[in-house]
Amino acid sequence: MFEASDRLFHTTAKVFQVVECLGCRLIRLSPRPTPRELIDYYPETYYYSPGSDKTSSLEEAYRRLVLLDHVRFAERAIKDSGEEGLVLDVGCGGGLFLDMLRRRGHKVAGLDFSIAAAATAWRHHGVPVICGSLSSAPLAVGSCAAVTMYHVLEHLYDPVAYLEAAHKLLAPDGRLIVQVPNVASWQFLIFGETWNGVDVPRHLVDFRSSDLEQLLEHCGFEVLRRKHFSLRDNPAGFASSIAPNLDPMARRVRKLPESPTEKLLKDLTYLALTIAALPFTLLEAACGAGSTIMIEARKKS
């Protein structure tokens, strides 16, 4: 389909192809990086870690605001399930989402490959995190009321193994919540290889809604609910596609030299772009073509 490199974090100058299977139409990265190569494409600070200055405090307040969208989606799923077990967030990063759920009375735990992310989740948010793979997580079968995977499946060599592991960990009527970028979105049609949701070379697979639903069905799940809009991701993804050099996380990861005033101005410009993108992203989501797809599923009866 096209060639691209790491447009956001500049971890490599290597060029990759994004290809589409002529049979099943699945879109993926080619060639796939080896596991050893892939490590180098994830910066040490590839997760949100709160700072101590005033600007960082404002950024965390903003993140909590836009994450309410995800929290409410998860809470409704947990309530509908009637289960009272653990809420496990896979790929939890710094644990902000879990902290918000914990403050609402839920039992929570995270899982992440990054020891630094686990330390941040515990130190800043009091959230316990397991370091490692979901397939070998030290949790009892059927112990989870919900397993959440926000922007995880597209990063995996074997998403089937993770979904099968989640199936085992979920209680009988527990809920799986997954979110991925949606290559059937208007944003992908507009931006193509410069769309933030492609995120070469970290995204190994690029899902359409139909691809994700077929994968879930194959792994023993039935879809209960779909959501095409994320207040955290859809408008910000549009802004980062237009101006990747203003993306706050990308600037932090690349350690660009900025004075406090320059940092504030860039943050405000990025926020303005994000707000300006809101009407368009709401429209595309209303038409079923949002730049993300969030799904609630449970085990097949």
Image (tube, grey):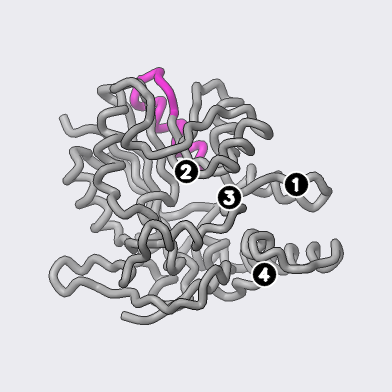
> Mark 1, residues whose alpha carbon is within 10 Å: few (<14), some, or many (≥20)?
few
The answer to which of marks 4 and 2 sits earlier in the sequence is 2
The residue closer to the viewer here, 43 or 26, is 43
Query: How far apart are labels 3 and 4 at the CA level?
Result: 17 Å
Which mark is nearer the camera, 4 or 1?
Answer: 1
Residue farthest to the top, as pictured: 84
* Residue type at tag 3: Tyr
Residue 80 in magenta stretch: yes
Residue found 48% across the figure and 32% down from its top: 130
Residue 244's place in the image compared with 78, above or below, is below
> Mark 2, residues whose alpha carbon is within 10 Å: few (<14), some, or many (≥20)?
some
Residue found 47% across the figure and 43% down from its top: 113
282 to the left or right of 166: right
Residues in magenta? 70-87
Which dot marks residue 51? Answer: 1
Which dot marks residue 113? Answer: 2
